[in-house]
Image (spheres, helix red, strand yellow):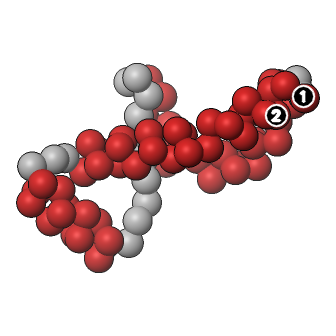
């Protein structure tokens, strides 16, 4: 399992923490649910692209989206 850090403003973090507590969930659990729902809603896009393009090409298309995740600040998590 990988670790991903997410930056959100303090007011959103506090609201998420309150909602998670009220629902008896963790903030990580809520984020996992949201990510799962997003993947489920968008899985067809991957299937359609994989039928028409090489999957390596698809991953190259998404590289720009992940540049923000590649930073020295998060390097500490790489060895966990």
Q: Nearer the viewer, residue 40 or 57?
A: 40
Task: Pinpoint residue 55: horizontal percent, then vertical percent.
Answer: 81, 24
- Residue 34: give x, y in percent of width and height: 40, 49
Residue 70 visible in the shown view? no
Secondary structure of the residue carrying tag 2 is helix
Residue found at the very far bottom of the displayed protein? 11
Write the residue at 19% across / 47% down: 26
Mark 1 surroundings: few (<14), some (14-19) or many (≥20) residues within 10 A: few
Q: Is residue 37 above or below residue 17?
A: above
Looking at the picture, how far across and down is residue 68, in whole percent?
63, 53
Rounded to the nearest angstrom, the CA distance separating label 2 from label 1 is: 6 Å
Helix, strand, or loop for circle 1?
A: loop
The answer to whether 64 appears left or right of 5 in the picture is right
Front-most of residues 18 and 42 = 42
Q: Which mark is residue 49?
A: 2
Q: Answer yes or no: is residue 73 visible.
A: yes
Which quarter of the rendering shows the C terminus?
top left
CB atoms of marks 2 and 1 within 8 Å: yes
The numbered disc on residue 17 is none
| Crowdedness near tag 2: few (<14), some (14–19) or many (≥20) residues, C-alpha within 10 Å | few
Q: What residue sits 32% from the left and 71% below the top?
A: 12
Q: Looking at the rendering, in which quadrant would you find the N terminus?
A: top left
The residue indicated by pointer 1 is: 53
Which sits in the foreground, 11 or 42? 42
């Amino acid at each position: 399992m990988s670790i991903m850090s997410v930056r959100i403003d303090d007011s959103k973090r506090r609201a998420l923490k309150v909602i998670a507590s009220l629902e008896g969930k963790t903030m990580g659990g809520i984020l996992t649910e949201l990510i799962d729902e997003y993947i489920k809603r968008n899985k067809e896009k991957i299937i359609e692209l994989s039928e028409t393009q090489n999957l390596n090409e698809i991953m190259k298309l998404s590289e720009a989206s992940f540049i923000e995740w590649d930073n020295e600040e998060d390097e500490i998590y790489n060895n966990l």
